[in-house]
Amino acid sequence: MKNTYDLNKERLKLAFISATFGTIGIVTHFIPLSSAAIVFYRALLGGIFIAFMTYLSGKTVNIKAMGDNFFVLIFTGFFMGLNWVFQFEAFRVSTVAIGTVCYNTMPIFLLIIASFMFKEKITLKSVICIIIATIGVILVSNVIFTGIRSNEVLGCFYGILGAIFYALIVIYNRKLSHIETHDKVIFQFIFSAIIMYIYIIFIQDKSLFFEENISNKELLIGIFCILLLSFFHTGFCYVHYFNAVSRLKAETVAILTYIDPVVALFLSYFVLKEKATGLQMIGAALILFSMFANEIIKNKKMLFKDRILHLVGK
């Protein structure tokens, strides 16, 4: 029997989830931990939550499928950890607005990397979008007025690095075969947590715990935000996100996922009181416009819906 869904409910669900993803920057703002430590807890607790949800739904974890895709899963898990670290570092050194808009240049790097790895042709329209996005990044970074060593430029650099690793996740997910989404995500999350643990303890030589000099209020808020980010933003929302995007048209998904950066920009300005110049706002608008236009007008052979279905690192 063919499955039937209420598409209006699915649209509302995806809109809500995209808006929720837009609050990640403000949530991490109140967590007094390093970016690597935040990624550790997000990946570990998020992976455990999804494994638990998988168990409750009556599904089982396919160990054989994980083994068959082991090396690709290792790569994507590693890229996922770096993706999140650079995203959070962009928020930390600059603003949520700058980190968000630069992180959303991912489709540009997806186009460029795919053109080399899969010999996918870049159209003239895509080239125009790349040029517009590049101008937008220059304006957002404010490099013209502040110089190359400013926090805005560093935030753009981290955001773009996050976008590159995000694109690599999408690219390498195309190489996965005969593996369910929940199996893939559980492995990638847990492996990312392991990598972050090794990095923090043995390379950074730092602790995973909150600093001792913070107040009890800051501690409680930090713990609440870590749990919110891990269980709600990562665990709960991912489960429903994958369901929604698999039932909607690619064009609908493209439009609704851009609620994420819009919400992030709104919260950055009105809640965190992060200021932006007129040129930075124009740059942000150019980046979002170029990304949106690229997703809508590009050739469907680029398999946009395939990218969405295999999305893991938002």
Image (cartoon, rainbow, N blue to C red):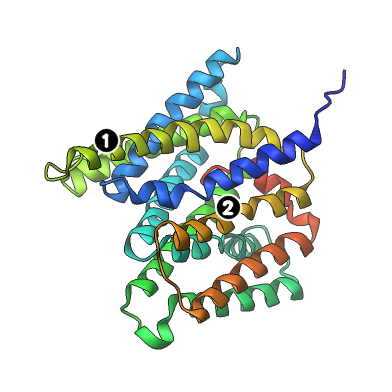
42 w.r.t. 59: above or below:
below
Regarding residue 230, the answer to whether it shows in the image is yes
Quarter of the rendering containing residue 40: top left
Position in image of residue 29 (x %, y %): 35, 51
Position of residue 32 in the picture relative to residue 226 (left or right) = left
In the image, which is nearer the foreground, mark 1 or mark 2? Answer: 1
Find the distance from the CA under tag 1 to the CA under tag 2.
Answer: 27 Å
Position in image of residue 152 (x %, y %): 38, 73
Position of residue 312 in the picture relative to residue 292 (left or right) = left
Q: Secondary structure at mark 1?
A: helix
> Which mark identifies residue 260?
2
54 w.r.t. 306: above or below:
above
Amino acid type at image mark 2: Asp
Task: Tell which of 15 and 272 is nearer to you.
Answer: 272
Whichever of labels 1 and 2 marks the residue nearer the N terminus, that label is 1
Position in image of residue 73 (x %, y %): 50, 38
- Is the C-beta separation of discs 1 and 2 under 8 Å? no
Task: Tell which of 124 and 174 is nearer to you.
Answer: 124
> Which mark identifies residue 298?
none
The crowd level at tag 2 (other Cα within 10 Å; few <14, some 14-19, many 20+) is many
Amino acid type at image mark 1: Leu
Regarding residue 175, the answer to whether it shows in the image is no
Q: Secondary structure at mark 2?
A: helix
Position in image of residue 124 (x %, y %): 75, 76
Residue at the left extreme of this rendering: 213
State the residue position of label 1: 220
Residue at the right extreme of this rendering: 1
Image quadrant for the N terminus? top right
Identify the residue shown where x is 57% and y is 63%. 109
Position of residue 66 in the picture relative to residue 244 (left or right) = left
